[in-house]
Image (tube, rainbow, N blue to C red):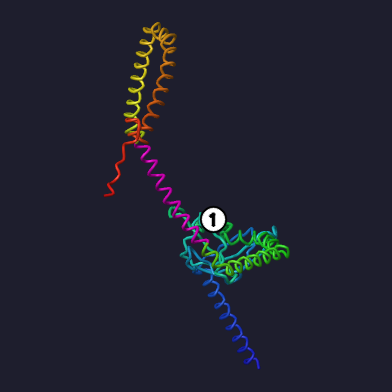
Amino acid sequence: METRASYVLIGAFVMIVMGAAFLYILWLGQAQREYDEYDIIFTERVSGLSVGAAVRFNGIQKGEVDTLSIDPQDPSIVIARVRVDKDTPVKIDTKAELELVGFTGLAIIQFVGGSANKPLLKEQTEDRVPSIKADASGFAAFLEGSGDVLAQANRLLSDENIEGIASIITNIEVLTSAFADNSDEIGTTLENIDAITTDLAKVTAKLDAAATGLQTFMEEDAPATMDEVDALLGQSRALIEDLRGIADENRSSIKVFADQGLGQVAPALGEARRLFRTLDAMLREIDRDPNAYFFGERAPEYAGSDE
C-alpha cells in the first residue's frame, strides 16, 4: 500500500511540474507576442464598434479590437484596446478615428498618417499600453448630428407638409392634364412664337444694319456733309449781307417807287384786265362765226339751177 501511494504522489508531482512548465511556456509566448497593444480613447459615441472589429492602418487591416470599456472616472470616455501587428508603424503623430463600413452599420478603427521622420509611439512612452486620443471622424460627426437631422426630417415630414406636397402633386397633375387637352393650341402658340421670334430676328438684323450704316455715315460721310452745310450757310450769309447792302444803298429810290410807281401800277393792271376781256370776247366771236365778224354779214349762198 505504501508503495502504491508513493507512485500516486510521484505521478501527481510530475503532472504539476508539466502543467507549470506548460503555463510558463504559454506565458513566455505571450510575453514575446508578435503584436502591439494600444488604447484608443473616444470622447464620443462608438455606435457600430464591437470586439473583434477590424483595425486598419491607411486602409490595410493590421489588427482587431480586443476589448471595449468605459472609463470609470469619466463615463463619457470609451476605451478601445486594440492589437495590431508588431511591424505597424504607429508614430507619435498617427491619428485614430472611427470609420463606417459600407451601409452595414458596422464600424472599424482606422489609423491615419504619421510622419516618416517621427519616432514610434511605443518607443516614446513608459506606459505598458500607449494611448491615442481618437479624432472626430465624419461618421462620428454624423452620429452626433443624427438626432438633429432626424428632428429636422420629422418636421419636414409633418402631416401639414405632407398635405402641402400632396396638393402640389395634384396641381401638377391638373396642369399636365390641361397641357395634354390643349396640346394642339399649345403647338400652334409655339409655332406663332417661333414665327414672331424669326420676325424679330429679321427686324433686329435690319436695325443692326441700319445702325451700322448710320455709324458709318456719322464716321465717314457726316463730316464732309457738315462741311458742305457750313459752306452753304456761309454763302447764304454773304448773299444776305449783299442784299442788305443793296437795300441800304437804294432805300430812297425804293421809297419813291413804293409811293409813286405802285400807285400807277394799279390802274395799269385794271386797263390790262379790260383789254384781256375784250380780246377774249373778240376771239370767241371769231371762233363762233368768222364770216359775220369780218364781213358783217353771212356769205351769199348760191342755189342750183332748176333747168
Coordinates of residue 240 in the picture (x, y in percent): 37, 16
| Residue at disc 1, secondary structure | loop
> Looking at the image, which residue sits at the far bottom?
1
Amino acid identity at mark 1: Thr
Number of residues whose C-alpha sits closer than 10 Å to that of mark 1, classed few (under 14), some (14–19) or many (20 or more): few
Residue visible at 64% across and 90% down in the picture = 5
Report the front residue among 98 and 101. 101
| Magenta range | 189-216
As for residue 112 lying within the magenta part, the answer is: no
Residue visible at 56% across and 81% down in the picture = 18
Q: Is residue 121 left or right of residue 292?
A: right
Q: Is residue 303 left or right of residue 97?
A: left
As for residue 214 lying within the magenta part, the answer is: yes
Report the front residue among 210 and 64. 210
> Looking at the image, which residue sits at the far right?
159
Q: Is residue 93 left or right of residue 207?
A: right
Coordinates of residue 132 in the picture (x, y in percent): 57, 58
Report the front residue among 229 and 190. 229
Coordinates of residue 227 in the picture (x, y in percent): 33, 25
Coordinates of residue 249 in the picture (x, y in percent): 36, 7
Residue visible at 40% across and 48% down in the picture = 205
Residue placed under numbered mark 1 in the picture? 125
Residue visible at 31% across and 36% down in the picture = 299
